Every structure is written in structure tokens, then in C-alpha cells.
Amino acid sequence: EPEVTQTPSHQVTQMGQEVILRCVPISNHLYFYWYRQILGQKVEFLVSFYNNEISEKSEIFDDQFSVERPDGSNFTLKIRSTKLEDSAMYFCASTTWGGGLENEQFFGPGTRLTVL
Amino acid sequence: AQKITQTQPGMFVQEKEAVTLDCTYDTSDQSYGLFWYKQPSSGEMIFLIYQGSYDEQNATEGRYSLNFQKARKSANLVISASQLGDSAMYFCAMREGGDSSYKLIFGSGTRLLVRP
């Protein structure tokens, strides 16, 4: 069964460093998402991506964040200068054509980012 | 205002008994979808069940059913015959039809512990 994959599973970085979180969505999916879950809290939407551009971003997704789909398979989230409060689990998700509300979003296993 | 409210931070249930996890939602859209996800301690997000706003019947998937009361804006998850492996966090989420990004909005979750 096709699945969303994410690398690395755990990333430890120093405050102020740049990190890139990588995701490989399911191959025929068209909509891609990043969500964040601070430990013990709810899952929060960061950004959605469709047709090679951002379709929506949340207040959390400030200028320190960027997304890219560099080669038609990978989908990356970059944090330019990490802060302590960026420590969280980051989930990538993808879904087929969004015309149906029922289309399930398939989540990757997540990358746990720890900023020291 | 919260779009998805889960009022039970934690629940206990005896193995083999049924349990209901509450979810209320708030939207002005006529067309929307409601989802439940399970998050075990390993962290991944597992899709359980979906209910569309126009679906006349309550959704069922194996031991999971969704008690959908549209007028009350509630979408409670019922797990029948609880198993030890059901111990996890459970998140209710909504996708609004007027949202072109088709993002999911999550509640704060309910931690379910199944007692042997």
C-alpha cells in the first residue's frame, strides 16, 4: 500500500541553525500539507501546496518557513533559523484531487524536531 | 472561537466495553467533512473514519462508528468492544467545503486508556 514517507525521523539542531525536513508524498497525489504538533498539544496546520505553489499558510508559517517541491517527488519544509519553540513533531500529508471532501489525507510518520 | 472542540482530555474504558469520544464542531459551511484520527504512542496519525455533512447515515468502519448529530453539530466517535491496542490519542478533525486548500482543522484530542 502506498504511503507517505518522511526523513529524518528525528532531527536535533542548535537554535539559529537551518533545518530541512523531507517528505515523499504518495505519487499520484496533488495536494500536500505540513502540520505541526507541539508535544502534548493538538495538530496545527502550517501550509498547503498545490500546483507548485502555496495555496494557504497559517499564522505560524512566517518568513522563517518555506516549502519546495524541487523534483516532482520530494516535498520539503525549510526552517531558516530555528527557535526553541520550533521543537515539535512535523507531519507531512498528501491527498488526491481535492474535489471531494471525503478524500483522506494520508499522513507520514512525522519528523521530531528538537531545537537546543 | 474553536472550530473543533473535544471536551474530554482523558478517558478510561474497561476492555471489551464500548466508549464514546465527544467532538463538537463549528462551521458556517453547508458542505464539510468530519474525520477521526488515532495517534498511538509511536506518534503516527492513523485515519479511522469519515462522515460527510450530507451523509444521511452514520459512518461505520468495523468497531468504529460515528454518531453524527448535525443539528447539534456533534460527531462523536464510538468504539465498540474496546481492545488494549485502542489505547491512544484520538483527534477529531474537520475539512470545510469552502476552504480551497482542503486543510484539516484538528481538535485538542482525547487520550483513551483501555484497562484490562
Image (cartoon, grey):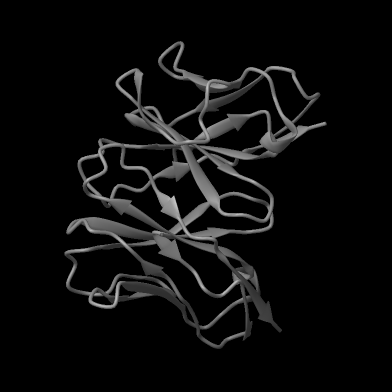
Q: How many marks?
A: 0
Judge whether B7 appears above or below A22 on screen.
below
Along the viewing direction, whichever of A100 and B106 lies nearer the viewer: B106
Name the quadrant containing residue A90.
top right
**Image quarter (top left, top right, bottom left or bottom right) of the C terminus of chain B:** bottom right
Residue A95 in the image: above or below residue B63: above
B99 displayed left or right of A1: left
Tell whether B87 sits left or right of A58.
right
Residue located at (25% from left, 56% from top): B32
**For the view shown, which residue lies furthest in the front direction?**
B1
**Which residue sits at x=33%, y=63%?**
B26
Left or right side of A24 for A90? right
Coordinates of residue B7 in the picture (x, y in percent)? 52, 73
Quick check: B94 above or below B68? above
Which residue is depicted at the point 62% across and 54% down?
Answer: A41
Q: Nearer the viewer, residue A84 or A39?
A: A84
